[in-house]
Amino acid sequence: MSGRLALVTGAARGIGLGIATRLFEEGVELILVDVLDEVKATAEDFNQRGGKAEAVKMDITDEGAVASLISDVGRRHQRLDILVNNAGISIKRNGEKIPLEETTAADWTRTMSVNLTAPFILCRAVLPIMRRAGWGRIVNISSQSGRTRPESTNGPYASSKAGLIGFSRVLAQEVADGGITVNSIAPGIIETPLQAMYGAHVQQAMLSRIPMKRKGTPADIAAAVAFLASDDANYITGTVIDVNGGMFMT
């Protein structure tokens, strides 16, 4: 993958940082997007270590900002090979999921905006660049809660992640003849700041359902992303890879 150009959202922390780090190690040039200032330090670190990385602080739900960013990337680089839609939110109350009957329309709309609408906006924006190149990799980070029993997540989150899988399959069908693959990854319980927001008893309940008896790490997810973004995955599209230590079986 050396020399490819990738855009990763939610790249400042957690899974996104793990993905960015793995792609950097593979020699991929990076555009790191996040709402947090920390993303600038990440890009600076990669550059000091011999990589090529740009940091963009922005809200990916801002359609105009996304259009401007992708237009600028296309003008300056004439390509964008890999898109990883990783950014996501899960609204909680005191570390606990919020029952649907107590969920506000604002909670629902905000979650959908970040977790589902933003990936749609980004995919739509990058497709012309990938089509011109005749090659592209789109990897959408969903969740186990979008695949099976959403024990610890709320309705908006689980719905948005299930929707992202459906969206990915539709898009995969539409672009398959253009050398572009679209796949999803469904992480299980991963050690991230987002996951750490859950209360202690919720954490223990989740851990008890993992046959491997450990939480995953961002590096576990990053390994799957690196595979799907590589030439080794040329004939894989429209699929979901479960990375959850066997939790999908329980």
Image: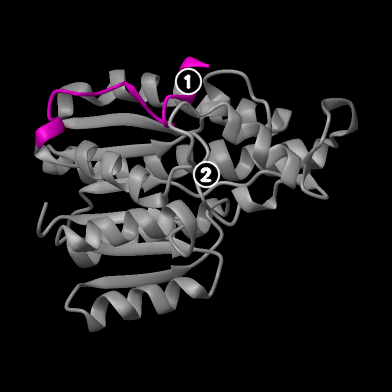
| Badge 2: residue crowd in 10 Å (few <14, some 14–19, many ≥20) | many
Residue closer to the observer: 181 or 17: 17
Give yes or no for residue 172 being in the magenta stretch: no
Kindly identify the residue that appears in the image at 38 percent across and 40 percent down: 123
Can you give x and y, in whole percent of width and height, for residue 55 in the image? 39, 71
Residue position for label 1: 248
Q: Quadrant of residue 33?
A: bottom left
Can you give x and y, in whole percent of width and height, for residue 166 in the image? 46, 20
Give yes or no for residue 239 being in the magenta stretch: yes
Q: Which residues are magenta?
A: 232-250
Q: Is residue 167 left or right of residue 115?
A: left
In the depicted structure, whether residue 159 falls above or below residue 50: above
Q: Secondary structure at mark 1?
A: helix
In the depicted structure, whether residue 210 falls above or below residue 94: above
Q: Amino acid at mark 1?
A: Phe
Kindly identify the residue that appears in the image at 23 percent across and 36 percent down: 228
Q: Is residue 100 left or right of residue 162?
A: right
Kindly identify the residue that appears in the image at 24 percent across and 39 percent down: 137
| Badge 1: residue crowd in 10 Å (few <14, some 14–19, many ≥20) | some
Residue position for label 2: 118
